[in-house]
Image (spheres, helix red, strand yellow):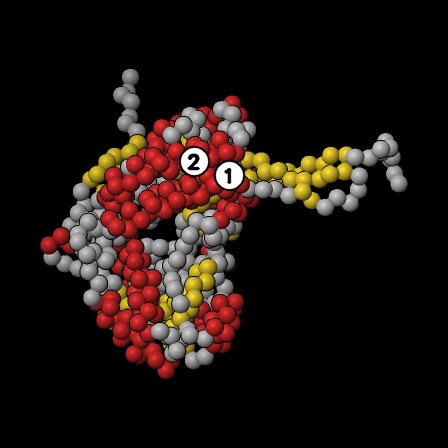
């Protein structure tokens, strides 16, 4: 008899030094089926979906308390798993805590509608959970993205199967463990592990999964949408971006330049809303670009737990190779690399997946480097003549996730903010985000809105109920 083969594993590598952190077993098809079966059983028999909202809220608050108690260890685990600076990881755990607290509040205060009657009846709506929800999250901000999906889905009464990215597999199981310890019934939150093309695809196609929520790349999003369409189940898709960051001549220069640098080089550019296209009004183009380049050159690139670090490594070595290929393609298109464009060398840099802050100009708005998402610390700069020219260039991409506008003119900010095709518009600020405000994209940047009160409604179905008040029996026809 042939020996049993060991299950394949995911290997978590610390991108700061190349060291192996952990090995995580990949979920087999049989284990996936069993997880969905447990989730379905828990949904129907645990009492969670019929639990009074204020009691459901108590469990969500307890999950937040559990995350708070382990904030530092969770932040350090995420730092090792995907290389983000420790301070940023702490902020992301805080965001996850706040998300569970917010949806605890929404859970026990959300109201539905008593609708205007047009006959002898009273009509109103209630929200019903879907059942088993698949939540598929990316590698760039795991604990924060996990909470953004799991908290409202649980608040709505669902069971959740969470599939983290294969490149950041360590935070999802910790969230599930903390949720169980907080009193969430067994089976309502489970984690499956593996590649999106394998485990993720099987999860989306599973006949007992009734809704899918995905954050990631547009190519994967389209594939999920096709399966969801064939199955006639809803899919919420938060996808890629190529966000324009606009600086007009009358902008507060110091604040605008600081925001441009933070908007692209924060998180090493590994953010769906990174301001990766910089549009500068023609009359001040050279001056503003020179200041941005000077600030980029001065950023402290270092280990994620180093004092004063501003940019750590990229999340993986293979992703750094992807970013490097992007820059080389930009060069081939005629782009001028004004700073960066390479991995730093020497000392700790030789062992980690580091890449320098990079600024490129000399390209037209329709060049590949101005159209494709680098998802790294790469900024392309373009001039514009007037508002019409700006809107045409900024909207001339398949994406529409976010944008930033710097101007002292309220009327101009309003005109441009309404004209740009983006789900989030930041005026004289950038990359602000709060759980209470809806988030999502236009065009190829996605379908649906997460966060806010509607972020809970996303995971629920509206049911209309009528109570008859008529005094006479209903007639066949009137």
Residue 304 shows in this picture: yes
- 19 or 334: which is nearer to us? 19
Residue drawn at 48 percent across, 56 percent down: 441
Task: Give coordinates of residue 426: x percent, y percent.
Answer: 43, 63
CA–CA distance between discs 2 and 1?
9 Å
x and y, in percent, of residue 127 in the image:
59, 38
334 or 277, nearer to the observer: 277
Q: Quadrant of the N terminus?
A: top left
Q: Earlier in the sequence, mark 2 or mark 1?
A: 2
Query: Residue at position x 52%, y 47% from top?
Result: 453
Image position, residue 313 (x, y; %): 23, 53
Query: Which residue of the protein is positioned furthest toward the bottom in this rendering?
Result: 283
Q: Is residue 322 left or right of residue 347?
A: right
Q: Position of residue 304 (x, y in %)?
A: 21, 50
- 405 relative to 13, above or below: below
Residue that numbered label 2 is attached to: 60
Q: CB atoms at circles 2 and 1 under 8 Å apart?
A: yes
Identify whether 282 is placed above or below 354. Answer: below
Give the residue at x 39% y 78%: 250
For label 2, the SS is helix
For label 1, the residue is 107
For label 2, the crowd category at 10 Å Cα-Cα, with few meaning under 14, some 14 to 19 and many 20 or more, is many
Q: Nearer the viewer, residue 145 or 350?
A: 145
Residue drawn where x is 69% and y is 36% of the image: 465
Q: Residue furthest top?
A: 1
Judged left or right of residue 120, residue 149 is left
Farthest-out residue, right: 478
Q: Residue furthest left?
A: 347
The quadrant of the image that shows the C terminus is: top right
How packed is label 1: few (under 14 Cα within 10 Å), some, or many (20 or more)? many
Q: Would residue 226 be visible to someone looking at this image?
A: no
Quarter assignment of residue 199: top left
């Amino acid at each position: 008899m042939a020996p049993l083969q060991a299950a394949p594993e995911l290997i978590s590598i610390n991108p700061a030094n190349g060291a192996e952190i952990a090995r995580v077993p990949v979920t087999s098809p049989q284990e996936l089926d069993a997880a969905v079966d447990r989730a379905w059983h828990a949904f129907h028999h645990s009492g969670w979906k019929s639990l009074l909202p204020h009691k459901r809220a108590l469990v969500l608050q307890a999950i937040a308390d559990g995350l708070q108690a382990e904030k530092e260890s969770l932040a350090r685990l995420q730092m090792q798993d995907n290389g983000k600076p420790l301070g940023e990881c702490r902020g992301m755990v805080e965001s996850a805590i706040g998300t569970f607290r917010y949806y605890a509040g929404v859970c026990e205060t959300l109201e539905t509608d008593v609708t205007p009657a047009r006959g002898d009846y009273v009509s109103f709506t209630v929200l019903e959970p879907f059942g088993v929800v698949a939540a598929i999250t990316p590698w760039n901000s795991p604990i924060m993205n996990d909470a953004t999906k799991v908290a409202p889905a649980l608040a709505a009464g669902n069971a959740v199967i969470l599939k983290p990215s294969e490149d950041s597999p360590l935070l999802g199981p910790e969230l599930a463990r903390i949720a169980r310890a907080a009193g969430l019934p067994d089976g309502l939150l489970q984690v499956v592990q593996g590649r999106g093309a394998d485990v993720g695809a099987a999860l989306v196609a599973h006949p007992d999964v009734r809704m899918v929520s995905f954050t990631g790349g547009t190519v994967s999003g389209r594939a999920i949408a096709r399966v969801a369409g064939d199955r006639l189940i809803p899919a919420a898709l938060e996808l890629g971006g190529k966000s324009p960051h606009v600086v007009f001549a009358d902008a507060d220069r110091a604040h605008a330049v600081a925001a441009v640098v933070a908007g692209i080089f924060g998180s090493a550019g590994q953010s769906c809303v990174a301001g990766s296209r910089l549009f500068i009004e023609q009359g001040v183009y050279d001056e503003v670009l020179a200041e941005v380049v000077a600030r980029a050159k001065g950023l402290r690139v270092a280990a994620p737990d180093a004092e004063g670090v501003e940019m750590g490594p990229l999340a993986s070595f293979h992703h750094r190779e992807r970013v490097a290929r992007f820059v080389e393609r930009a060069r081939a298109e005629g782009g001028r690399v004004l700073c960066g464009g390479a991995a730093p060398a020497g000392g700790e840099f030789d062992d980690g997946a580091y890449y320098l802050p990079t600024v490129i100009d000399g390209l037209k708005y329709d060049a590949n480097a101005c159209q494709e998402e680098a998802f790294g610390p790469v900024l392309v700069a373009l001039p514009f003549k007037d508002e019409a020219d700006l809107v045409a260039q900024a909207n001339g991409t398949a994406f529409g996730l976010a944008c930033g506008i710097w101007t002292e003119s309220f009327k101009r900010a309003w005109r441009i903010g309404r004209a740009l095709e983006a789900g989030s518009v930041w005026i004289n600020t950038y990359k602000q985000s709060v759980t209470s405000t809806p988030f999502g994209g236009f065009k190829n940047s996605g379908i649906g809105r997460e966060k806010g009160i509607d972020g809970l409604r996303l995971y629920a179905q509206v049911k209309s109920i009528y109570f008859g008040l008529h005094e006479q029996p209903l007639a066949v026809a009137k």
